Amino acid sequence: MLIESYRLEIEVATHSDQEFEYEAIAHFDVDISEALAYLNTELNSGTYFSDGPAFSWRKNSHKIGFWPKKIAADHLETREQAEEIIEGLVKLVNDVWERRHEIEPDTRTHEKRQPLELFKLLPKTNCKVCGENTCYNFSIKLASGLLELDACVPIIQEEQYGAQRSSLQSILKVKRPLL
Ligand code: SF4
């Protein structure tokens, strides 16, 4: 196991009298720099930065950062959620590290996905099943990793969208290095 223990720091970020959120940071003594290149391969919507190094990723509404000796997550509603998310992220690093012999490490920074490229392949019916008002809004969140393709039920389930589904799955799977 790479991260055997960590110290959890939870902070309150206040936005107004009534609006606040929790931010959580796991601090550990072990250096996970090498593991970040494996995360870069495994997590398609994340971004690797060689300075540091560091790896940023979005999971639902949370911005997540991985550094050599800490992992941080924001936009947490409760302390319990903070504990749960951080525990999951530590487990993710440990799981990827355990499987590192099956994974090609990648230390390149990749081009961000363009919403328009994704939008062109969506059904464009604005049916709202995904929870977004328009397919274009969905494509923005899909590109940033805030939503997964599975949230668009029509494209996953309807036969008529089979070719578009395959194209989207390929685009979302492949990371393109910045030149
Ligand atoms: S579920 Fe799919 S088709 Fe419907 S609005 Fe969302 S992205 Fe568009």
Image (cartoon, grey):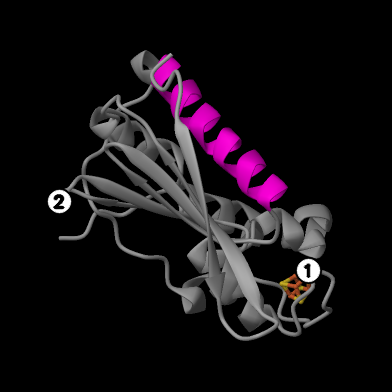
Q: Nearer the viewer, mark 2 or mark 1?
A: 2
Using a 10 Å C-alpha cutoff, classify the residue at mark 1 as few (fewer than 14 neighbours), some (14 to 19) or many (20 or more). Answer: some
* Residue depicted at x 31% and y 54%: 176
Ligand 1 image-quadrant field: bottom right
Kind of residue sitting beneath label 1? Cys
Query: Based on the displayed image, in which of its 4 quarters is residue 39 positioned?
Result: top left
Observer-nearest of 91 and 109:
91
Percent across and percent down for residue 4 are: 44, 18
* Highlighted magenta segment, given as a residue range: 79-98
Establish whether ligand 1 lies closer than 8 Å to the Cβ of label 1: yes
Q: Which numbered dot is residue 58?
A: none
Secondary structure, magenta segment, majority class:
helix
**Image quadrant containing the N terminus:** top left
Q: Which numbered dot is residue 130?
A: 1
Q: Which residue is mark 2?
A: 51
Does the segment drawn in magenta span residue 154? no
* Residue depicted at x 21% and y 60%: 178
Percent across and percent down for residue 12 are: 55, 64
Percent across and percent down for residue 37 are: 28, 36
**Image quadrant containing the C terminus:** bottom left
Kind of residue sitting beneath label 2? Asp
Q: Is residue 70 left or right of residue 165?
A: left
* Residue depicted at x 75% and y 63%: 152
Q: Secondary structure at mark 2?
A: loop
Kindly give the residue lying farthest to the front in the view shown: 17
Percent across and percent down for residue 51 are: 15, 51
Observer-nearest of 122 and 3:
3
Observer-nearest of 63 and 75:
75
